[in-house]
Image (cartoon, rainbow, N blue to C red):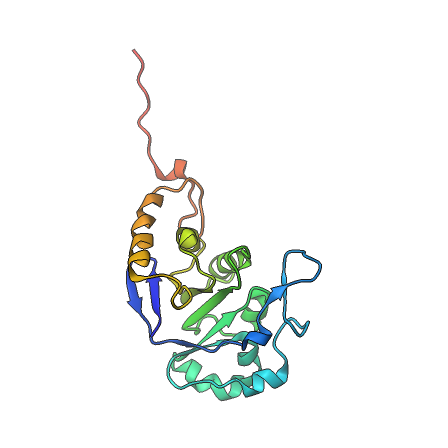
């Protein structure tokens, strides 16, 4: 079972399994060097033949958006039972997810960070929480680095899943303890839209 970090500072184990694409279909930088990712196939999503052969295990499972779109009829009953979540890659749009998934009923949505320098999932998280009013569990998966834990929580994530073996238990506990250093962030964000000056009542300075 994967070990996850919760927004309240708990480190727990989860029984959700993630269906991932094979390495040959992993995202890679575009040849132009511009910001963005493309599949090795050159397509925005995995090819149909790959989706058809991806195995979906029993029990709670998080599947790629493309797999859900292609095999929704077979997975709908498990989704309705709260056993299927959907993950969105950085090169996929939140609007596409919203059109394909009943976000009111979705038990879990995960957003993939293909690499630390790709911040599109931050924007996707904010869009899900603010524009689409998604209130279910929102996971950060992929290249989830401890230096960014606080920022991910501020953007609307409630659960973080670093890559298996990336951090020791001691490193995770240290990272979670450091979240207290961000008790009073200056800017407003998804977790609290008020800037610091609206959250803190200052006592007027009295000069004599």
Q: Residue at x 45, y 42 (%)?
A: 187
Residue 148 point in image, percent of width and height: 43, 52
- Determine if residue 72 is in view: yes
Residue 29 point in image, percent of width and height: 63, 62
The quadrant where residue 50 appears: bottom right
The quadrant where residue 155 appears: bottom left
Residue 141 point in image, percent of width and height: 45, 65
Q: Nearer the viewer, residue 203 or 30?
A: 30
Vertical relation: 98 (above or below) 147: below
- Position of 139 compared to 51: left or right? left
Q: Nearer the viewer, residue 7 or 11?
A: 11
Question: Which part of the image, by quadrant, shows the N terminus?
Answer: bottom left
Q: Residue at x 59, y 75 (%)?
A: 25
- Position of 100 compared to 79: left or right? right
- Position of 196 compared to 74: left or right? left
Vertical relation: 119 (above or below) 100: above
- Determine if residue 8 is in view: no
Q: Residue at x 54, y 80 (%)?
A: 67
Question: Which part of the image, by quadrant, shows the C terminus?
Answer: top left
Vertical relation: 110 (above or below) 188: below
- Position of 85 compared to 208: left or right? right
Q: Nearer the viewer, residue 135 or 147?
A: 147
Q: Nearer the viewer, residue 118 or 24?
A: 24
The total of numbered circles placed on residues is 0
Considering every residue shown, the one lying at the far top of the view is 208
Considering every residue shown, the one lying at the far right of the view is 32
């Amino acid at each position: 079972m994967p070990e996850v970090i919760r927004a309240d500072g708990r480190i727990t184990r989860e029984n959700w399994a993630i269906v991932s694409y094979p390495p040959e279909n992993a995202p890679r930088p575009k040849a132009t060097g511009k910001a963005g990712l493309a599949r090795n196939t050159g397509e925005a999503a995995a090819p149909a033949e790959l989706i058809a052969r991806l195995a979906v295990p029993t029990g709670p499972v998080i599947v790629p958006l493309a797999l859900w779109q292609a095999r929704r009829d077979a997975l709908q009953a498990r989704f309705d039972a709260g056993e299927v979540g959907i993950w969105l890659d950085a090169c996929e749009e939140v609007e596409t997810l919203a059109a394909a998934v009943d976000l009111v009923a979705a038990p879990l949505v995960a957003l993939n960070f293909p690499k630390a320098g790709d911040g599109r999932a931050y924007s996707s998280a904010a869009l899900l929480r603010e524009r689409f009013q998604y209130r279910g569990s929102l996971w950060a998966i992929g290249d989830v680095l401890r230096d960014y834990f606080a920022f991910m929580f501020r953007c609307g994530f409630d659960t973080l899943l670093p890559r298996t073996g990336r951090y020791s238990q001691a490193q995770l506990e240290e990272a979670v303890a450091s979240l207290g250093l961000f008790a009073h962030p200056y800017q407003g964000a998804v977790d609290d839209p008020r800037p610091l000056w609206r959250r803190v009542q200052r006592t007027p300075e009295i000069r004599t």
